[in-house]
Image (cartoon, grey):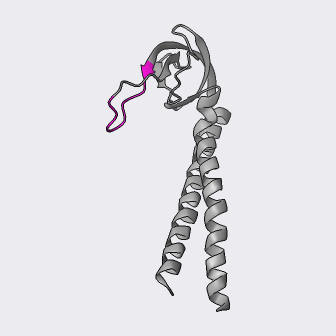
Amino acid sequence: MEIKDKISLVVSLMIALGGTLFATIAIREHNKTGHILQAGVQTQGMVVEMGRRPRKVGERVTPNSFAPVVQFTTDKGEQRKYYSTLYSGLDMYKIGQMVDIWYLPNEPEKATMAGGDAWILSLAFSIFGLVMCLIGYPWLFKIIFRKLRA
């Protein structure tokens, strides 16, 4: 096997396995959020602040993206905060705005908001996983079948 063929095999395998990993994470996140939406308790929460996205390593400028921090009360009367990870530069939420939130009764730290917060992570990982699998697996099978015929 030539070095070029070995490199192609390794790269195609890495892309295919990376796509599989992304797809697996997407399924896990979808199931986790789906479980919260199905088994959880729906309530109203209030946006109490807009949290700024943390700086990334090496980033010099202060980020202009914000995500809502929502305070809600559980059915047991406990005050909880939910920290969204859906950062946006747009003013999607205002402090004092009421939003729908779902949480697990026995694990209120596991919560999600209505809208993009509930599905954006699984969607992003699904897209990346699908694209990588559609590139990696056909390329990998082509290499394998070519070697089997030789």
Q: Is residue 12 visible?
A: yes
Q: Is residue 41 left or right of residue 80?
A: right
**Above or below, 127 relative to 105:** below
Q: Residue 44 in magenta? A: no
**Which is more toward the observer, 90 or 35?**
90
The main secondary structure of the magenta stretch is loop
The percent position of residue 106, horizontal first and vertical second, equals: 52, 32
Name the residue nearer the viewer: 28 or 107. 28
Q: Nearer the viewer, residue 66 or 64?
A: 64
Q: Is 134 placed above or below 51 here? A: below
Quadrant in the picture for residue 101 = top right
Decide if residue 57 is on the left or right side of residue 20.
left
The residue at the point 53 percent across, 73 percent down is 8
Image spot of residue 129 (x, y percent): 60, 54
Q: Which residues are magenta?
A: 51-60
User: Which is more toward the observer, 11 or 122?
Assistant: 11
Residue extending furthest toward the bottom? 150
Q: Which residue is located at x 48 percent, y 74 percent?
A: 7
* Residue sitting at x 60%, y 58%: 132
Image quadrant assignment for residue 42: top right
